[in-house]
Amino acid sequence: MPLSRQYRFPRARSSVGAARTFVLETLTEWGYRERHDDVRLCVSELATNALLHGVPPGREFCVALVADGPLIRVEVRDSGGGSPQVAQEGAEACGGRGLRLVMALADDFGVTSHNPGKTVWTVLKTASAAVDGAQNGSN
């Protein structure tokens, strides 16, 4: 049975670090010990993009984590318009690399549109499923 947990974050810079902490503490609690650096970077980029481009003032964004066997799925949902685009910036550009990094690290990546908003998600494969402590069920 998949494990899942989600948390809502305010539109604030501090929410990016809080989202990383939420995801990594949850994965550790569930017994996932692999790919923490990859997950950390993906959460950072997706949460930052939600704040910069997707969360209207006064609104929140939601980070959801689903673990199913060896698969870890991270979702960031916001209520803003538009769809994320992978920037085709030059090597000297100061920004625009976030989604390219996520796509390079992830085993799967996508965007699901909602009305309003969208969910940007990524899936990372691990070598094994969670250990015994995670078998308590989902939250």
Image (tube, rainbow, N blue to C red):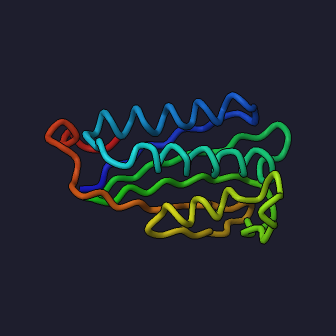
Residue found at x 67% / y 66%: 114
Does residue 132 appear to the left or right of 98 in the view shown? left
**Residue 53, horizontal then vertical, whole percent:** 80, 53
Task: Looking at this view, name the residue that lies furthest to the left.
Answer: 132
Q: Would you identify the image quadrant in which residue 10 lies?
A: top right
Vertical order, 89 against 22 (above or below): below
Does residue 99 appear to the left or right of 51 in the view shown? left
Q: Would you identify the image quadrant in which residue 99 lies?
A: bottom right
Q: Would you identify the image quadrant in which residue 88 lies?
A: bottom right
Q: Quadrant of the C terminus?
A: top left
**Residue 16, horizontal then vertical, whole percent:** 64, 36
Vertical order, 43 against 81 (above or below): above
Of residues 138 and 54, the one drawn nearer to the viewer in this rendering: 54
Does residue 36 appear to the left or right of 43 in the view shown? left
**Residue 26, horizontal then vertical, whole percent:** 38, 36
Q: Quadrant of the N terminus?
A: bottom left
Residue found at x 65% / y 46%: 47
Residue found at x 57% / y 36%: 19
Vertical order, 57 against 65 (above or below): above
Of residues 122 and 104, the one drawn nearer to the viewer in this rendering: 104
Q: How many marks?
A: 0
**Residue 8, horizontal then vertical, whole percent:** 60, 38
Task: Looking at this view, name the residue that lies furthest to the front.
Answer: 92
Residue found at x 22% / y 53%: 129
Vertical order, 72 against 12 (above or below): below
